[in-house]
Amino acid sequence: MNRDLAVETDGLKKRYGDLTALAGVSLSIDAGEIFALLGPNGAGKTTWISIVCGLVRATAGHARVLGHDVVRDPIAARKLVGLVPQEVNFDPFFTPREVLSFQMGYYGQRADPARIDEVLRALDLHGKADTNTRALSGGMKRRLLIGKALVHRPRVVFLDEPTAGVDVALRRDLWSYVRRLRQEGTTIVLTTHYLEEAEALADRVAVIDRGQLVGLDTTAALLARFGNKQIRVRLSAPVATASAPAAPPLPAWLQELGATVDPTGHVVTCPLGGMAPAALLARLGSLQPAVADIDTEQPSLEQVFLALTGGSEGSATKAPS
Amino acid sequence: MNAIGFRTLFAKETRRFLRVPGQTLAQPIVTTALYFLVFGYALGGRVREVDGVSYIRFIVPGLMLLGLSQNAFLNTSSSMFIAKMQGTIVDLLVAPLGVVDLLLAFTLAAILRGMMVGGIVWVISALFTGFSVGHPLWVLVFGLLVGATFGLVGLAVAIWSDKFEQLNIVPTFIITPLTFLGGVFYSANMLPPPWSYVSRVNPVLYMVEGLRYGVVGTSSSSPWLGLAVTGGIGLLSLAIAAWMLATGYKLRS
């Protein structure tokens, strides 16, 4: 048992009849980090979180929160966590202020009006604090879920798709709030379909596919390992394409590097691979037709995700902007 | 035990039914008042006395039990079922609330609502029959026990139910028939054999008779027998609800 670990799972398995939702996932999440779980729909991310939060019972394996086993010592483990579930829920009888007050009470804390106001303000719900939750918009209900997970100052917060369906401005606000929580020492574990979100927030990323852990590293290391930086050049005249074979062909050395041409014949995209950028730029200087413009494309978690899951991109989406 | 957590949940469950008093308090009062007027006055003209008590006074404890049991059942069953359907059950399952905290909070709120309705029914009835109470302590004991029992049954039924239809099966096909056939409007002594014997197998009869002993001062069976039967069913309901919460039956997959 390591006290510096916020969450630890050993060989976590979950079977529903013949379906294996988790096939032995072992993860260790350090206290104070932002950790992202990525994976296609049905990969097992929510099952993993649900076991750690005590909503689902594991078929095999162990889960601990700050050293407390979630099965043998569930009350101590649950005291330390806050969960933003994937599905939006609301209690139609009460207002956001009342809901947050109840939430503090469930965690053994006396309702603290100052803390409740602070959370309502941080989530831009202050104007609706005393309105029945039924009257809140979808985005507000989701923000209230986040408030419920945070109001009791948990040491580990699980955010299961926290920004699904949330507009861009609010998403950015939530990101900065998550970063602030981390600065205050809170451990954040999030699942997301928005790879941009994991890239922007996470210190480390785990990729789960078909119930198994297929990748785990720091975000930077995963990007360096799987994400290929690319150079994109716009040519002053087109090169040959399938639809216009009469134009001059793309030089052989570029084809060997894996460069591709867009359908107009004007844009060539070339992965850097192991080549130094300066060397590639020097060779591009003598290219005919001449280079009219040039830019670089950063590697993205999307590339990592696709590489690790073998292209099961059904759930890997770009955040709408 | 999480004392603040339990108190919070109890306060929330109480506030929930007080927030909709038209549905939770006024509606059962109107219904029971109608029973009282129709049965008490219409039948009371023909059946003047039952077991030595005027008919209109005789039916008061039964009507109290009707309001008490139905509202205790509804408080837990609707709250738990709505929480399951809305998804807010997650709040309780993830929070550090133990089985005892959950049971106590849900049951006490159910007792409170049941006894409030039962008490109001008594006050309305007493305007016509007089405010004397035979054995107040027995009224309190049966009020608490019956409220707790039906509250626990409501909790268990809501945990078991996956659909509204299932939620209604138990009150429609079990609780209501047993209550109406449990001597609310008649004495088991009025039935000819074998129905008088069949009637005595119904546990609700002993709850009604126990409350009748407390309110009116006399009953066709001993209040101690009523206490034993109600206590037994209460303990069985407690065991089932506690087992469901402890194992996470239909709550934690």
Image (cartoon, coloured by chain):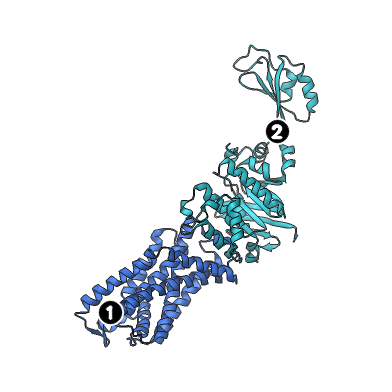
Chain colours: A cyan, B blue
Name the residue type under label 2: Gln
At 25% from the left and 75% from the top, the residue drawn is B39
Which mark, by number, is residue B128?
1
Percent across and percent down for residue B49 are 24, 85
How many other residues sit within 10 Å of disc 1, few (<14), some (14-19) or many (≥20)? Answer: few
Distance between mark 2 and mark 1 Cα atoms: 85 Å
| Residue A237 visible to an observer of this rendering | yes
Asked whether, in this view, residue B31 is left or right of residue A19, the answer is left
Name the residue type under label 1: Phe
- Asked if the residue at tag 1 contacts the one at tag 2, i.e. Cβ–Cβ closer than 8 Å, the answer is no
Nearer-the-camera pick, A297 or A303 = A297
Question: What is the secondary structure assignment of the residue under circle 1?
Answer: helix
Give the quarter of the image for residue A10: bottom right
* Quadrant occupied by the N terminus of chain A: bottom right
Residue at numbered disc 2: A298
* Quadrant occupied by the C terminus of chain A: top right
Asked whether, in this view, residue A6 is left or right of residue A166, the answer is right
